[in-house]
Image: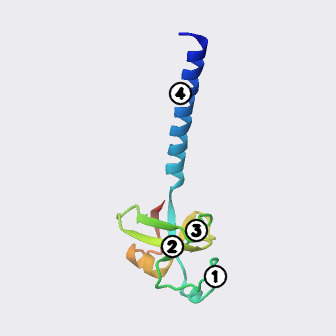
Amino acid sequence: MGALPRKLLACCLAGLFAVSAANALAHEANQEEGIASFYSDRFQGATTASGDSFDQQALTAAHPSLPLGTKVLVTRADTGQEVEVLINDRGPFVEGRIIDLSKRAARELGMLRRGTAPVMVTVR
């Protein structure tokens, strides 16, 4: 095998490796594990980062960095319960928490009594 075909083969293999690595990183970037909490009733009617009025009965959530308007599936890690919510605010502002849910979303995950729950957040 000559030098040119070896270089071409090496470039092709490097390209395939780069694409595979990028796909793996993109998949990981679409999922996040951590602790969910939910909004206090005192925020009812407050203006969210998106400009909407906060509604405890809407299926919405706050996330520190996902784009506003992103839909995510929140899965409770310990029970498998799921809810789809729209990111329309920023937060939570408590260390160790990754998402702050409306009361309706928290109810669907069965976490109202507990207050927090381990979850996986998956971008839709």
Residue 45 at what x, y percent from top left? 58, 89
Q: Label 4 neighbourhood size at 10 Å, few (<14), some (14-19), many (20+)? A: few
User: Badge 1 is on which residue?
Assistant: 51
Residue 96 at what x, y percent from top left? 58, 63
Residue 77 at what x, y percent from top left? 40, 61
User: Badge 4 is on which residue?
Assistant: 13
| Sequence-wise first label, 3 or 1 | 1
Judged by depth in the image, the label closer to the viewer, 4 or 3, is: 4
Question: Of helix, strand and loop, which one carries label 3?
Answer: loop
Q: In which quarter of the image is residue 39?
A: bottom right
Mark 4 vs mark 3, CA separation in Å: 38 Å
Residue 11 at what x, y percent from top left? 58, 26
Q: Label 3 neighbourhood size at 10 Å, few (<14), some (14-19), many (20+)? A: many
Amino acid type, mark 1: Gly
Amino acid type, mark 2: Leu
| Sequence-wise first label, 3 or 2 | 3
Mark 2 vs mark 1, CA separation in Å: 14 Å
Residue at 63% from the left image edge and 70% from the top image edge? 93
Report the side of 67 relative to 82 (left or right): right
User: Badge 3 is on which residue?
Assistant: 63
Task: Give the vertical position of 44 relative to 105 (above or below).
Answer: below
Residue at 50% from the left image edge and 85% from the top image edge? 56
Judged by depth in the image, the label closer to the viewer, 4 or 2, is: 4
| Sequence-wise first label, 4 or 3 | 4
Mark 3 vs mark 2, CA separation in Å: 10 Å
User: Badge 2 is on which residue?
Assistant: 86
Question: Of helix, strand and loop, which one carries label 4?
Answer: helix
Q: Label 2 neighbourhood size at 10 Å, few (<14), some (14-19), many (20+)? A: some
Amino acid type, mark 3: His
Can residue 107 be seen in this snapshot? yes
Determine which of the numbered discs, if any, sits on residue 105 in the image: none
